[in-house]
């Protein structure tokens, strides 16, 4: 009889966002009159920038003619986009990344989920708590997690690094050796950022312990503070120990278009059981070419337009709009006496509930009484219990309306 990959049976509950959708849909069925304001999943509300739309229209026209039609593209992405990425995201910040170290994909969720495949199953995984669930769940699927520990509400084989208000939501170094370290800054869900000094500790740790940092920088475009690094490669020595994920989803409204990239430097190495080490770049390239036929030409043409003069300006206007929402939310919730974090260099606001209310209780209360949807912090890990996350991706008048309703409640 065919057998199942039992690792999948170890996954806890459903994925967070479908569960939220399920509760919201159930509420909407019984309250068809309710005008629901969704501040749960971070999904964009502003249209694509005109420069991106024009570039994609041109790309569609090219695809519609025999002479300019593009079939399979390079699996790692078109040179025009890889070059634009290094020029605009790395050289411009004094970071040396080569175009062939950039692998274009159809999203950071896939990239962060897929990358673990090139590492041995005996590696110890370290994640922050709270954490973007994809890092944990994909390692569970691979079998790198041990059993679910009911008492702790965590997997026994994963090292969870608590991120609390006390440590500014940037974890301390682990007290036992770890090999695969997932960090995400600006952080999802807490909206916290990490300084060069804080990241340097991690880079030094990884160098000393021959570990790899999987650095998710999907929200770097929302950084407003000039002292905060946009890339882990702004830290000395990171090229030898870090992989970086970036996405056009939140930066340029590509959640429905799909385009992202991962940087795998040539200098990264991992050990073999017999003791010698191998380069990771060709291994990821091999994996990518085998399992992926490249992001669509139309998406990549649109992504390249993000780096044109017009594109940059238009995209910045949209980011400013979302960050304006974040400021409104911070102010309103702060005035109500809530402890409010994030929202200054990230599109997420992390809010402590009061009177011992659990995350899901707060979520349900808000949904029932104000018809506003947030994301329960507990869905991101044990340390997220007692917090909720609000997303700043919304229309400004809806954000004001949501804050009014919460204030009245
Ligand atoms: C979120 O709300 O955490 C993100 O939108 C989810 C994602 O990027 O997959």
Image: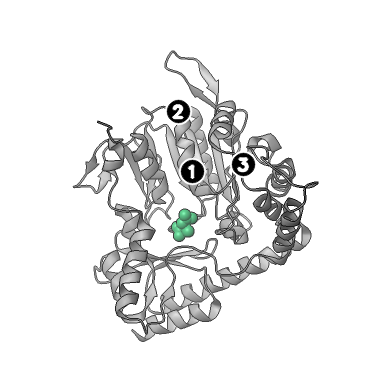
198 sits to left or right of 67: left
Q: Position of residue 220 (x, y in %)?
A: 58, 54
- Residue indicated by mark 1: 112
Can residue 353 be seen here? The reply is no
Q: Which mark is residue 283?
A: none
Going by the picture, which residue comes out furthest to the right? 67
At x 35% / y 54%, what residue is drawn? 15
Mark 1 secondary-structure assignment: helix
Residue 107 can be seen in this image:
yes
Q: Are marks 2 and 1 in contact (CB under 8 Å)?
A: no
Q: Earlier in the sequence, mark 3 or mark 2?
A: 2
Q: Earlier in the sequence, mark 1 or mark 3?
A: 1
Question: Could you tell me which residue is drawn at 38 percent across and 36 percent down?
Answer: 125
Label 2 Cα neighbours within 10 Å, binned few <14 / some 14-19 / many ≥20: few
Residue tagged 3? 294
Residue for point 53% across, 31% down: 287
At x 37%, y 55%, the residue is 164
- Which is in the foreground here, disc 3 or disc 2? 3
Up-down relation of residue 402 to residue 179 (above or below)? below
- In the rendered view, does 80 fall on the left or right side of 342? right
Q: Disc count in the image? A: 3
| Residue identifier under label 2 | 209
Closer to us: 8 or 409? 8
């Amino acid at each position: 009889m065919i057998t199942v990959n039992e690792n999948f049976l170890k996954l806890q509950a459903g994925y967070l966002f479908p569960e939220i959708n399920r509760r919201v849909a159930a509420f909407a069925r019984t309250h068809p009159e309710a005008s629901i304001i969704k501040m749960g999943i971070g999904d964009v509300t502003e249209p694509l920038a005109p420069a991106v739309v024009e570039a994609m229209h041109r790309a569609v026209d090219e695809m519609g003619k025999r002479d300019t039609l593009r079939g399979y593209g390079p699996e790692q992405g078109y040179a025009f986009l890889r070059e634009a990425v290094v020029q605009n995201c790395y050289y411009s910040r004094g970071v040396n990344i080569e175009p062939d170290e950039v692998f274009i994909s159809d999203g950071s969720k896939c990239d962060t989920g897929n990358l673990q495949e090139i590492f041995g199953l005996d590696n110890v995984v370290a994640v922050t708590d709270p954490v973007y669930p994809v890092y944990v769940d994909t390692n569970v699927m691979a079998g790198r997690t041990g059993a679910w520990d009911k008492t702790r509400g965590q997997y026994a084989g994963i090292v969870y690094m608590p991120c609390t208000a006390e440590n500014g939501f940037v974890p301390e170094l682990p007290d036992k050796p770890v090999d695969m370290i997932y960090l995400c800054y600006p952080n999802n869900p807490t909206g916290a950022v990490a300084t060069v000094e804080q990241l340097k500790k991690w880079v030094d740790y990884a160098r000393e312990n021959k570990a790899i940092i999987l650095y998710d920088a999907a929200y770097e475009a929302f950084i407003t503070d000039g002292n905060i690094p946009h890339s882990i490669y702004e830290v000395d020595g990171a090229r030898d120990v870090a992989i970086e994920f970036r996405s056009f989803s939140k930066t340029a409204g590509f959640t429905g278009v799909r385009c992202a990239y991962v940087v795998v430097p040539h200098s990264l190495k991992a050990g073999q059981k017999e003791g010698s080490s191998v380069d990771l770049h060709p291994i990821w390239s091999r994996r990518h070419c085998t399992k992926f036929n490249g992001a669509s030409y139309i998406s990549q043409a649109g992504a390249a337009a993000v780096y044109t003069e017009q594109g940059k300006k238009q995209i910045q206007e949209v980011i400013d709009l979302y960050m304006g929402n974040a400021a409104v939310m911070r102010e309103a919730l702060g005035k109500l006496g809530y402890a409010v974090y994030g929202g200054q260099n990230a599109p997420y606001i992390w809010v402590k509930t009061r009177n011992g209310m659990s995350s899901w209780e707060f979520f349900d209360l808000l949904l029932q009484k104000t018809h506003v949807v947030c994301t329960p912090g507990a869905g991101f890990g044990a340390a997220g219990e007692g917090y909720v996350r609000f997303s700043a991706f919304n229309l400004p008048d809806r954000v004001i309306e949501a804050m009014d309703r919460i204030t009245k409640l």
